[in-house]
Image (cartoon, coloured by chain):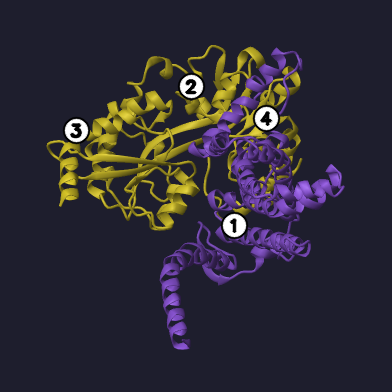
């Protein structure tokens, strides 16, 4: 019996290893290896014409955090400011897309199965066309003579065109627009799995609507909220297309800064150092919020 | 077997009677007349593929990273110099071709390749101000440009490019656009910062906004004339205080798999009628002297496109600033972060 079990276990292990090997190999080659290269480049000296020179160089981090020689490398607090600003925009994107998607998720989950499927299809529809094309469409909608302003002026809500294009508001709008599907899908699956009997029970036992929401509905959908928030937050921090196209490049985001180091400043190591910092900050934010969620009993 | 058969059939269908191989071009977006490629293929049977980039550094990074399939690239002159120093370019001996005499010696601008033993001058142009005269009135230079928002309420944009934007500040401070002195770059930064509140955006995507009237004026490459010139009231001017010019050269990569085909393409482009085909659609200046007479008359007579000598005198071309590029990078970060 015991021998048979062990044999089964090893066979299971073998199957598991075989099944996981391609994935492990894939992640190792296409995720870990690039990550190691970025980490390595971030402590090397920049080549004059791009690339790296193979000597240890800590100023890439120094110029961000405050130790720099003041000759070749100068410390400037703007890099931390840019990082904070980008985190702020990402947080705002998370909150706004959550507020937008949460009620809609409830609404969609109550529809008949057929209409529900249709709505889920609608949510994923934007993925069928290129992101850049869709953002150009927003540029045409938001511009002073664009669709939005002519519509609002046509019905007499405003007399002067609104200045939205090339403002931070346009950046947030564009980011929320891109991220809504990523927020909606995990939220919807959490809401769809919500045990309606518990809501009825809560109401029967005398809780009012607000109490029911905070004590029953919210905790049960929290995993969906957390999932959506994480998936929206990470790409939002590093996004550089939206600030460029809709923000008119007037406010620098950390993603733009990284792009610029590789594509115009020819400073790969500094770009790599900035990428490492983005990754660590995002990881920290995630771990701390997941830790808090765990404590809250999710 | 079946797949092989299909591949063979495709090859037979695509190649003409004298199939000779391929040529992979890596050029800026919208920077070559596609008819030239078609004509080249018709004449030689060499199939041409075209990929595009949007900055010299993007191209350099790809080539350095080992994108070995490209044959011909079109770096700006300063990048031409850098690529030569890095040993990335192939000596073609194009200057020994019989038709090389068509090339204007004034266009041999590369410091590392003064005799054009490697690369062929491809095209050159200016970066100036496009404006909607109905809104802005006549515009002569940068001073008029930055006065537009206050005077008329019209919006203005600059390029999303650190060298081009800082060049405006440097020229307005009377300095070289290739300044490497931190104090001079600081002057330029301060100039741009005082203008920033009036600048609606730093962007390349300006054509639709300019033609729809949402933007009154924009810093842009002369090539946008292909869109704006037919529109009444749309004008282009090379600013009175000074402007930058650019020139790209056609170079063969040392790693090019099709060097013979690449040289054939260079020689093809030395023909005046081919160079003129390009200048006519791209609105650029041509380095090919006889080609200049073949360009449509309205372009030839426009002093902002076919630039006379006295205007040439106020144009500056970018050079590689070496380590001082860091100064520009920091200045550009400050400009974009300051609200």
| Nearest to viewer (mark 1 / mark 3) | 1
Q: Is residue B173 visible?
A: no
Residue beneath disc 2: B227
- The spot of residue A20 in percent (x, y) is 45, 68
Q: Colour of chain B?
A: yellow
Whether callout 2 and callout 1 share a subunit is answered no
Q: Nearer the viewer, residue A91 or B142?
A: A91
The residue that label 3 is drawn on is B43
Circle 1 residue: A271
Identify residue for label 4.
A165
Q: Is residue A15 left or right of A297 when viewed as pictured? A: left
From the viewer's perspective, tell me whether residue A94 is left or right of residue B163.
right
| Chain that bears disc 1 | A
Q: CA distance from mark 3 to mark 4?
A: 48 Å
Tell me which label, 1 or 4, sits earlier in the chain.
Answer: 4
Nearest-to-viewer mark from 3 and 4: 4
Q: Secondary structure at mark 1?
A: helix
In the rendered image of this protein, which colour is used for chain A? purple
Q: Which quadrant of the view contains residue B164? A: top right
> Which of the 4 image quadrants contains residue B53?
top left
């Amino acid at each position: 019996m015991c021998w048979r079990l062990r044999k089964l276990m090893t066979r299971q292990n073998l199957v598991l290893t075989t099944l996981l090997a391609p994935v492990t190999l894939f992640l190792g080659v296409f995720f870990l290896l690039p990550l190691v290269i970025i980490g390595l480049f971030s402590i090397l000296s920049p080549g004059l014409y791009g690339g790296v020179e193979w000597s240890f160089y800590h100023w890439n981090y120094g110029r961000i955090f405050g130790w720099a020689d003041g000759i070749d490398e100068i410390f400037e607090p703007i890099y931390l400011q840019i990082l904070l600003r980008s985190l702020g925009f990402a947080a705002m994107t998370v909150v706004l897309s959550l507020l937008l998607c949460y009620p809609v998720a409830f609404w969609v989950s109550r529809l008949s199965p057929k209409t529900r499927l249709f709505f889920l299809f609608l949510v994923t529809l934007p993925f069928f066309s290129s992101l850049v094309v869709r953002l150009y469409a927003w540029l045409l909608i938001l511009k002073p003579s664009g669709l939005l302003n002519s519509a609002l002026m046509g019905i007499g809500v405003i007399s002067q065109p609104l200045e939205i294009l090339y403002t931070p508001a346009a950046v947030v709008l564009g980011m929320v627009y891109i991220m809504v599907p990523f927020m909606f899908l995990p939220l919807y699956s959490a809401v769809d799995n919500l045990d309606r009997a518990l809501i009825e029970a809560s109401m029967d036992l005398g809780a009012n609507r607000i109490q029911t929401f905070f004590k029953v509905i919210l905790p049960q959908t929290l995993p969906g909220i957390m999932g959506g928030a994480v998936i929206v937050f990470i790409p939002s921090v590093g996004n550089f297309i939206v600030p460029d196209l809709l923000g008119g490049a007037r406010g620098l985001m950390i993603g733009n800064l990284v792009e610029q180091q590789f594509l115009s400043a020819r400073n790969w190591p500094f770009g790599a150092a900035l990428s490492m910092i983005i990754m660590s900050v995002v990881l920290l934010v995630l771990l701390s919020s997941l830790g808090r969620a765990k404590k809250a009993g999710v | 077997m079946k797949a092989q058969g299909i591949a063979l059939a495709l090859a037979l269908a695509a190649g003409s009677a004298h199939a000779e191989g391929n040529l992979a071009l890596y050029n800026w977006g919208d920077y070559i007349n596609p008819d030239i490629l078609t004509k080249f293929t018709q004449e030689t049977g060499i199939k041409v593929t075209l990929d595009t980039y949007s900055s010299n550094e993007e191209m350099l990074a790809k080539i350095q990273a080992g994108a070995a399939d490209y044959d011909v690239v079109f770096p700006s002159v300063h990048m031409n110099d850098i690529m030569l120093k890095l040993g990335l370019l192939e000596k073609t001996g194009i200057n020994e071709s019989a038709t090389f005499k068509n090339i204007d010696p004034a266009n041999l601008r590369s410091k590392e390749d003064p005799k054009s033993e490697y690369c062929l001058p491809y095209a050159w142009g200016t970066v100036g101000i496009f404006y909607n005269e109905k809104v802005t009135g006549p515009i002569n230079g940068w001073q008029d440009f930055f006065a537009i928002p206050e005077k008329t309420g019209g919006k203005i944009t600059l390029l999303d490019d650190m060298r081009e934007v800082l060049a405006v500040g440097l020229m307005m401070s009377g300095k070289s656009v290739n300044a490497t002195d931190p104090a001079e770059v600081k002057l330029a930064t301060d100039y741009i910062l005082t203008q920033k509140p009036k600048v609606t955006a730093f962007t390349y995507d300006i054509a639709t906004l300019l033609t729809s009237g949402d933007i009154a004026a924009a810093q842009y490459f002369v090539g946008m004339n292909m869109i704006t010139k037919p529109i009444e009231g749309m004008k282009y001017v090379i600013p009175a205080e000074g402007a930058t010019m650019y020139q790209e050269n056609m170079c063969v990569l040392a790693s090019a798999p099709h060097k013979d085909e690449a040289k054939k393409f260079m020689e093809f482009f030395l023909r005046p009628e081919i160079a003129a085909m390009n200048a006519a659609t791209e609105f650029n200046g041509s380095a090919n002297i006889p080609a200049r007479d073949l360009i449509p008359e309205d372009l030839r007579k426009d002093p902002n496109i076919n630039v006379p000598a006295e205007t040439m005198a106020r144009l500056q071309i970018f050079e590689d600033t070496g380590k001082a590029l860091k100064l520009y990078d920091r200045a550009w970060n400050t400009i974009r972060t300051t609200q």
